[in-house]
Amino acid sequence: MAASSLLTLLDDIATLLDDISLMGKVAAKKTAGVLGDDLSLNAQQVTGVKANRELPVVWGVFKGSFWNKVILVPLALLISAFAPWGITPLLMLGGAYLCYEGAEKVLHSLLHASQAETAHQRQQRLAKEATQDAKAYEKRKIKGAVRTDFILSAEIVAITLGVVSDAPLLNQVVVLSLIALAVTVGVYGIVAAIVKLDDLGLWLNQRTSALMQGVGGMLLAFAPLLMKLLSAVGTLAMFLVGGGIIIHGIPVIHHLIGRWSQGMGKLAAALITNGSSLVLGLLLGMAVVLVVNLIGRLRGNG
């Protein structure tokens, strides 16, 4: 009897693990697009930090991201169980905030471009900022990155929850926890590697081997270009993710875009879907910036 009970238990565990593995694969596929945005956003969030402080900053954001997941996973399960109607509005609020952050970055870049800051002036400004209050600057960087991570993590958790919503509670908990842990470790592991790419290039460039020196020189040339690219992609990702969340939250717009792209090839459909998210995200972000600035002025005058 004991042996048969043990075999039954092992069979149940094997079935559970098989179900979890299958749901985990499906969830990973569905969240892959958001992971790309998460990576580019967080890599560009740590730019401007001193070289010897890059990894501590990434570690700080990693810890914040981990606690985001600790909050979001049980919160998502509770909302799904008792107020499933609340998931979409909360995600839409987060999406609007992402669009707002993206619009602020665009306006900030345009403002600095119009001021025509020279390379020497920029170097002096950065040096002054670094010597004034480096710790406060790092804290602001970490806080901003963790705040952005919270919204992206919420979307990843919501997508995963949609995959496992019909599964038993234990399966939901395990899959959500595994995806959350894998996302956090994977994304910030890659971010750490990206921000230290120039240090690796410098180390290789100082070797005696001509081949290593050549590879090191290529990495040193490539690293700043990659960071600039990630900064631009990260800003675009804010509009794409934020606009996409808003579109999915408004059925009329979602179905309309679906009709436009229906019958087209994969590339054309992707261009229409992503283009719609980008345009809507940019317009919404600019509108939110306008409202926030207007409220700020009214409060200032009051």
Image (cartoon, rainbow, N blue to C red):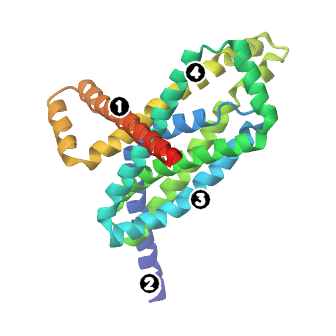
Q: Earlier in the sequence, mark 3 or mark 4?
A: 3
- Point 32% across, 30% down: residue: 279
Q: Earlier in the sequence, mark 3 or mark 2?
A: 2
Q: Earlier in the sequence, mark 1 or mark 4?
A: 4
Position of 138 with respect to 162 (left or right) is right
Q: CA distance from mark 4 to mark 2?
A: 71 Å
* Element type at mark 1: helix
Amino acid residing under circle 4: His
Amino acid residing under circle 2: Ser
Is residue 176 or residue 241 the one in the foreground?
241
Where is residue 212? Give x, y as percent: 76, 16
Q: Earlier in the sequence, mark 4 or mark 2?
A: 2
Quadrant, the N terminus? bottom left
Q: Considering only vertical position in the picture, is 167 above or below 88?
A: below
Q: Residues within 10 Å of mark 2 (few under 14, many from 20)?
A: few
Q: To which quarter of the image does residue 258 belong?
A: top left
* Element type at mark 4: helix
- Point 62% across, 48% down: residue: 143
Label number found at residue 278: 1
Residue at image mark 3:
67
Amino acid residing under circle 3: Trp
Q: Earlier in the sequence, mark 1 or mark 2?
A: 2
Is residue 16 or residue 219 the one in the foreground?
219
Where is residue 244? Give x, y as percent: 33, 40
Amino acid residing under circle 1: Leu
Residue at image mark 4:
112
Q: Nearer the viewer, mark 3 or mark 4?
A: 4
Residue at image mark 2:
5
Q: CA distance from mark 1 to mark 4?
A: 23 Å
